[in-house]
Image (tube, rainbow, N blue to C red):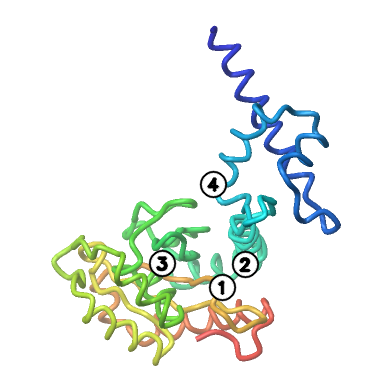
Amino acid sequence: MTQKRALGRRNLSVVKALAVLELFTTQDGYLTATQIGQALRISQGSLYPILHALEAAGYLIRDNGKRYRLGYKFLEKANLVLQQSDVQSVAKPYLKDLAIRLKANVHLGVLRNRKVLYLWREVGSGTVIISEIVGWQEPAYCTALGKTLLAFLSEEELEEYLAQEELTPLTTYTITVATRLREEIAIVRARGYAISDEEAHEGTVGVAAPVRGFSEQTRAGISISVSKTRFEKERDVLIQAVIDVAAAISQRLGARGGGG
């Protein structure tokens, strides 16, 4: 089989998989393999590998009656799309203003698969250049942004995170003991902001605060990165600036009490 022909077959499988998903509607939320095959005029032999792949990936769920319905993976993806669209568009001008005003790098991120997923960055300083870019991921336990996002998980979610995450040291200051990290997160939750004091990058301090939406749940977080020397001189000003901007973004997103 030529490479071109093999690619064509894979593309056809994708088309068929999408066609299967399109069959599910409010009226037809549950479908058997027979119903799907008849609707799409696909033989059962060709259909079952597609159904199996969609089920394994979480896009379909099969009940005891052998009926299929859409899986929870769609909720996960839909939530990600919503967070990346409205939060990012609302936050961008605030992040740019903060970066210019503080002459510091400013980040926007969410928690995904136990890591910080960076949605945006405004570069306001040439002295602290860190490798985060849009789509880049970093451990949550050692970044200010990550600790902020962890602090507003439910207790069950936090315990699950601590049980699963390996706290590998990135610097000599990284917190690597779960009990110590739990204590740190409790402090973040109580005061409304987080600090990463050279825990992810030597010589760099991060300050972060949560961004909330209409439901008052934490939608994302914003952070700044500055040198350790500068943070020691301007600590209170830098922290308050991050808290204020997070609150302003939160209010734009419908949070009644702002951020923090």
Residue 239 pos. (x, y %):
40, 83
For disc 2, the marked residue is 87
Q: Which mark is residue 104?
A: 3
- The circle on residue 144 is none
Q: CA distance from mark 3 to mark 4?
A: 41 Å
> Where 166 sits versus 133, above or below?
below
Q: Residue at x 64, y 25 (%)?
A: 11
Q: CA distance from mark 1 to mark 4?
A: 25 Å
List the residue tagged with mark 1: 219
Alpha carbon separation for disc pair 2 and 3: 21 Å
Q: Secondary structure at mark 1?
A: strand
For the residues marked 2 and 1, what is the alpha-carbon distance in whole angstroms? 8 Å
Tell which circle, 2 or 1, labels the residue nearer the N-terminal end: 2
Disc 2 and disc 4: Cα gap in Å? 27 Å
Quick one: label 4, few (<14), some, or many (20+) residues within 10 Å?
A: few
Measured as percent of width and height from the top left, residue 17 is found at: 67, 36
